[in-house]
Amino acid sequence: MSQERGAEVRDWLLEKAQPSVRYFSLLDLLGRSAEDPDVKEARSRLGRAGWAAEILRRQRPQGFWERREPRNVAEVVDFLYQPPFRSTNWQALVLADLGLDRSDPRVRRIADLIFAYKLRLGSPFNFFHEEACIAGNTARMMTRFGYGDDPRVRKLYDWLLEDQREDGGWNCSQGTPGTLDVWEPLAALACVPTASRSPSMTRSIERGAEFYLERKLLEEGRRYAPWYRLHYPNHYFYDVLVGLDLLTRLGFSDDRRLRPALALLKKKRTSDGRWRLDKAHPDVGAGVEISSEPSKVKPLRLEREGAPSKWITLKALTVLKRTGESE
């Protein structure tokens, strides 16, 4: 790709209309420091413009996104997760990805709900024996929100370490080998600063990374079409960009086993230097079930399917930079 085309893509990502994309582009692509005036300005606008602001405008006073407030504890728990991909948990995961944290009172309201109803040992609905995908998503979200040192969040990490399988992967079915589908525990561990990781966490990361690398991020005894398409939000679904972002973030950028996945990512780049949003979730293939019929689930979209995606382009370029393959 020409330098001129690369500059056009960079300027597109740095547009102020989407401060989250601008913020992470400055940090991850241009290598600016957190104290850089442009970085600080972009960060100050995360909850006031763009996708995050649109999401937060729909938040209810108690912190929920549902149209009415819950009447009892059981309804609170249901309201956090239902309907799929549109309720509180799913909106909060996106906000955490977009860079929001506890400095925003609206994020603190979300965290208060999670702590009160899902991270309380005395609650019959607590997270500490939930499936690894749910626990991993919550650990990642709460760590990004700034609660990674809270004992209740650390206990979630203890559960994720305990649930890691002998082969280094994770699964949401007990007594089964790991699967590439369950990437959330490793993604949660990637959010813990290196200096804050226990020896057990470091060993878990090494084993988990090897699980993905030995499968070249895509090989699990079948060709599963959704893994070859690019999505955002990901919710609890896996694809090749999820794997590449995770493994390169963890420091395995030089591993030769990434090459097939990198080749696929580069092949999906369009002639204008961007990447498209291939599909919005739920994008499921044979053998995968979700809690509701896919045809009845309303997707959570930030960008239009089939159109150039700022978020996916940012992530793809970040992966290529980490692997030394950016142009």
Image (cartoon, helix red, strand yellow):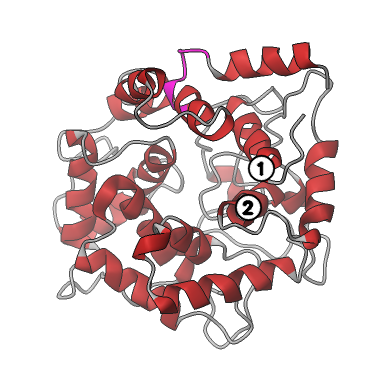
Image point 37% across, 73% down: which residue?
Answer: 198
| Residue 295 image offset from top left, x and y in percent | 61, 44
Q: Amino acid at mark 1?
A: Val
| Residue 75 image offset from top left, x and y in percent | 23, 55
Q: Quadrant of the C terminus?
A: top right
Q: Quadrant of the N terminus?
A: top right
Image point 67% across, 38% down: which residue?
Answer: 321
| Residue 196 image offset from top left, x and y in percent | 34, 63
Dot 1 and dot 2 residues touching (CB under 8 Å): yes
Crowdedness near tag 1: few (<14), some (14–19) or many (≥20) residues, C-alpha within 10 Å? many
* Residue 127 in view, yes or no: no
* Residue 187 in view, yes or no: yes
Q: Label 1 belongs to which residue?
A: 319
Among the two numbered marks 1 and 2 on one chain, the one whose residue lies closer to the N terminus: 2
Instruction: Please report the bounds of the magenta region as a residue range.
Output: 15-20
Total tally of numbered discs in the picture: 2
Q: Amino acid at mark 2?
A: Thr
The verdict on residue 115 being magenta is no
Image point 48% across, 66% down: which residue?
Answer: 185
Q: Label 2 belongs to which residue?
A: 248
